[in-house]
Image (cartoon, rainbow, N blue to C red):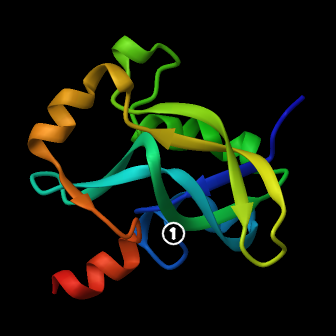
Amino acid sequence: MYINKLFVFGTLLPGLDNYKRFLEKCQPEYYPARAEGIMYYLPEDGYPVVLEGKGEVKGVLYDSDELRVVLPEIDDIQKFTGIESQSYLVRRIVDVENLETGAKVKAHMYLWPPSKALWLKENGVIIYDGDWMNFLKTKK
C-alpha cells in the first residue's frame, strides 16, 4: 500500500523555498499537524532535524497522490538513500495527528538516524517547542 501523506516541519513548510521548489507543483492539500520527536537546530547548516523521542514536533501534513512523483526528488535533498548508514536523514512511516480533525494517520517523515544521535546531541540545539516557524521568528 502506498502512503500519499508527508509530514514536514522545516524547509518544506508552505511558503518556504523547498515547498515552492518541490511540493507546490503537486498542489497538495495540507493541514496543521504534529508528530512525536525532538527537534534540533543545526547552526552550521541553518535548518532543523528531528530525532525520534518523546517530544512534540509541529508541522504540516501534506496529502496528494502526486507525492509518489516528488518524493524521490525530496529524498535527494534530504540525502536519503534507503540505507540508514549511507543516508543523512532517514524516511520513516510515522503516526501523525491532523490538528484540524484530530485524526491520527500514517505519513512519511524525514528523521535523523538513531545511529548518529550522539553527534546531534553534541552539535545541535534543541528547539523545545518543536516549532520551526516560531523558532525562525524569535531567532531574528
In the rendered structure, the answer to whether residue 7 lies left or right of residue 27 reads: left
* Quadrant placement of the C terminus: bottom left
* Quadrant placement of the N terminus: top right
Of the pair 38 and 83, the residue shown nearer to us? 38
Relative to 114, is 96 above or below? below
In the rendered structure, the answer to whether residue 117 lies left or right of residue 3 reads: left
Q: Residues within 10 Å of mark 1 (few under 14, many from 20)?
A: many
Q: State the image coordinates of residue 138 (x, y, percent, origin top left).
A: 22, 86
Identify the image quadrant of residue 101.
Answer: bottom right
Q: State the image coordinates of residue 90 (x, y, percent, origin top left).
A: 47, 29
In the rendered structure, the answer to whether residue 44 lies left or right of residue 3 reads: left
Relative to 10, is 106 above or below? above
In the rendered structure, the answer to whether residue 14 lies left or right of residue 138 reads: right
Q: Residue at x 80, y 46 (%)?
A: 4
Q: Residue at x 67, y 51 (%)?
A: 6
Q: Residue at x 55, y 75 (%)?
A: 14
Q: How many marks?
A: 1
The residue singled out by tag 1 in the image is 13
Of the pair 114 and 61, the residue shown nearer to us? 114
Of the pair 90 and 40, the residue shown nearer to us? 40
Q: State the image coordinates of residue 112 (x, y, percent, origin top left).
A: 37, 36
Q: Amino acid at mark 1?
A: Leu
Q: Residue at x 41, y 62 (%)?
A: 11
